[in-house]
Image: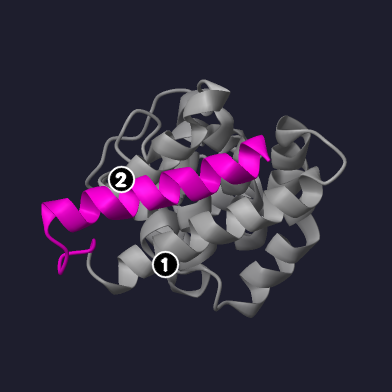
Amino acid sequence: MEYDHLVLCDAPRPRNANATRQAILEAARERFCSDSYDDVGMRDVARDVGVDAALISRYFGSKEDLFVAVLDSCKNGRDLMEGPREDFGDRLAREIVYGDLTPCEADGGGAKMRGLLILLRSVGSAKAMDVMQRTSNNRFFDPLAAWIGGPDAPVRARLAAGLIMGMAIGRELSDGYASLDETQKAELARRMSAALQGLIDN
């Protein structure tokens, strides 16, 4: 099948293949951060970039393949480990309690959480869960356990991940902890920081 004639939409299409592929990947990452796997359509991503949906299939294959590529672009969980080890708990707690967890751009707010956001958005999708269950160890738990180190690192990695994901879900359900005042938010961040750092330091 030829793709010489693309249907252009509102957004201008990048002029070369690498730029086009990257633009598609970034648009898909934004979509999967904001909506569940089942609610994201190839046509939606194509419209965001300004190309025909057939071009996405050409570069990435199926929607499942595009979803995997988006997850791969999130550094396999290593985003959470960037920065000093001794500040891990404080960094993550502050990002969850105070950070903007909505944007997923590489340089935007919530960037370190974008992989988790995608997982949380799509946890109710059978297709997405199949992908995540097949790849979550290599993509997230194993790198985190290796970074933590020690004979019980896999256990601590899962406890830390559970706390992080649980708090992220809690924030989503409570509209960014809107019911808490600043003193309560500070105490929440302090307690979460101590719990996470304790799991890392053992």
Please name the residue shown 65% across and 57% down the image.
Answer: 159
Residue 137 makes an appearance in the image: yes
Q: Is residue 44 left or right of residue 57?
A: left
Q: Secondary structure at mark 2?
A: loop
| Residue 181 in picture, x, y percent from top left | 11, 59
Residue type of the residue flagged with mark 1: Ile
Query: Residue 81: which quarter of the image?
Result: top right
Mark in front: 1 vs 2:
1
Q: Amino acid at mark 2?
A: Pro
Query: Does residue 186 belong to the magenta stretch?
Result: yes
Give the Cα distance between marks 1 and 2.
16 Å
Q: Nearer the viewer, residue 164 or 74?
A: 164
Residue 116 or residue 199, whichever sits in front: 199
Residue 13, position as x, y percentages in the image: 35, 34
- 118 w.r.t. 12: above or below: below
Q: Quadrant of the C terminus?
A: top right
Residue bearing the label numbered 1? 169
Q: Is residue 144 magenta?
A: no
Magenta stretch, residue numbers: 176-202
Q: Residue at x 38, y 28 (%)?
A: 14
Between discs 1 and 2, the one toward the N terminus? 2
Q: Quadrant location of residue 2?
A: top right
The residue singled out by tag 2 in the image is 103
Residue 18 left/right relative to 106 = right
